[in-house]
């Protein structure tokens, strides 16, 4: 999404989320016209820069907060852009949450937004099309293809029960803290992932006041080898492969761990690259550069699919790869300045994008 009008659109949504009137007006044509879709605002039509100011005031009256995430956009005709968006907010009077995925239709004049309207989402998706079918799909593995969160959360919860903790915190909470520790560990010089797992889980044990037994380091490695793919992984990857898309894994792990995981997934991959192979962990660009060199394809023909935003989406985009964020938990965009080309709830988005 590098076209000038698309960039203006991205800047508009960023300014809107910041409620920065000055920045918004700088992107709006003096004769801007748009209509609200919300009953709380009476479906009012707003015109001109004064109308933009009034629109923001009406939003503040109607909503405790209202933010927009850009999922995908395309210029379907000159100065005519379709944007797939996600709106999330909470009504001021009702207190009810809003979380929906509509679409915007925008017309540009003199490099500025001249008209903004809501349009049918299904038709918008047809027009946008999600971009061309990728030649190659690369994947973060754990959390994207395999249930990383469930695996590590269950392991840590069971560990605490084994150590006699009667009422451990939820597995999600235990996992989130362990992930923070692990992220810090891999920022140092490279070490095999089995060592990263051991060092991080023993540090986690000490933090939670349970014995830091070496056996837990080995047990976590064995547990990871057995973690299972998500239900959509195998059929969605099979559909993409049958459509002619090459499948490649790029994972922060060791070779003798990923080999077991690939067996669990049950789908042939054209290549598998690990941190062990390149001597570096994502978000370092080293692994991405290595994969691109092996593929021999232009970065724009490669789609990187991942759930780990800070590990994957940013580095992939910086190297010119297309990106798809697998947002299984319907979370807000972690970094509004880094917008993936696609946002999916599961891997069926890849199957649809790959279909002829």
Image (cartoon, grey):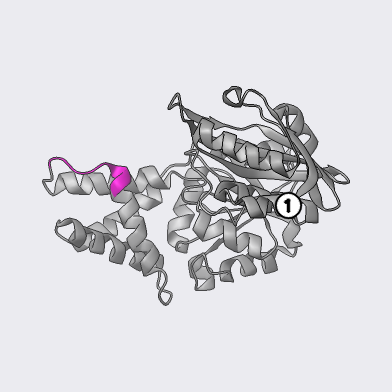
User: Left or right: 68 with respect to 182?
Assistant: right
State the residue in front, 42 or 152. Answer: 42
State the residue in front, 162 or 47. Answer: 47
* Residue stretch in magenta: 166-173
- Residue 323 shows up from this direction: no
Query: In which quarter of the view is residue 31 placed?
Result: top right
- Residue 62, image x, y percentages: 53, 30
- Residue 72, image x, y percentages: 69, 44
Question: Main SS of the magenta segment?
Answer: loop
- Considering only vertical position in the picture, is 249 above or below 75? below
Is 227 magenta? The answer is no
- Considering only vertical position in the picture, is 270 above or below 265? below
Query: In which quarter of the view is residue 154 placed?
Result: top left
At x 61% / y 32%, what residue is drawn?
101
State the residue in front, 148 or 126. Answer: 126
- Residue 353 shows up from this direction: yes
Tag 1 residue: 27
At x 62% / y 69%, what residue is drawn?
290
């Amino acid at each position: 999404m590098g076209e000038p009008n698309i960039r203006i659109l991205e800047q508009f949504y960023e300014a809107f989320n910041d409620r920065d009137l000055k920045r918004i007006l700088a992107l709006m044509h003096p004769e801007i016209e748009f209509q609200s879709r919300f009953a709380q605002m009476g479906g009012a039509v707003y015109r001109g820069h004064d109308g933009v100011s009034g629109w923001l005031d009406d939003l503040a009256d109607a909503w405790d907060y209202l933010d927009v995430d850009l999922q995908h956009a395309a210029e379907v005709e000159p100065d005519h852009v379709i944007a797939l968006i996600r709106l999330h907010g909470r009504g001021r009077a009702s207190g009810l949450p809003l979380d929906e995925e509509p679409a915007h239709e925008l017309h540009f004049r003199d490099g500025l937004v001249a008209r903004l309207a809501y349009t049918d989402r299904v038709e918008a998706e047809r027009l946008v099309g999600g971009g061309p079918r990728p030649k190659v799909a690369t994947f973060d593995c754990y959390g994207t293809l395999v249930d990383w969160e469930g695996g590590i959360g269950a392991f840590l919860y069971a560990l605490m029960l084994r150590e006699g903790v009667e009422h451990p915190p939820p597995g999600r909470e235990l996992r989130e803290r362990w992930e923070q520790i692990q992220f810090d560990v891999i920022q140092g010089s490279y070490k095999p992932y089995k060592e990263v797992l051991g060092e991080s889980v023993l540090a986690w044990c000490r933090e939670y006041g349970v014995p830091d037994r070496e056996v837990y380091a080995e047990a976590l490695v064995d547990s990871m080898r057995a973690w299972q793919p998500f239900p959509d992984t195998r059929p969605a990857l099979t559909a993409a492969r049958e459509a002619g898309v090459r499948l490649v894994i790029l994972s922060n792990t060791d070779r003798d761990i990923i080999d077991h995981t690939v067996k669990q997934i049950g789908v042939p991959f054209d290549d598998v690259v690990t941190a062990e192979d390149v001597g570096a962990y994502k978000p370092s660009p080293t692994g991405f550069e290595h994969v691109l060199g092996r593929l021999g394809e232009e970065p724009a023909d490669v789609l990187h699919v991942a759930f780990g935003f800070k590990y994957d989406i940013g580095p992939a985009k910086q190297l010119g790869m297309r990106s798809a964020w697998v947002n299984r938990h319907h979370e807000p965009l972690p970094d509004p300045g880094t917008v993936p080309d696609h946002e999916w709830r599961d891997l069926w988005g890849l199957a649809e994008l790959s279909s002829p």
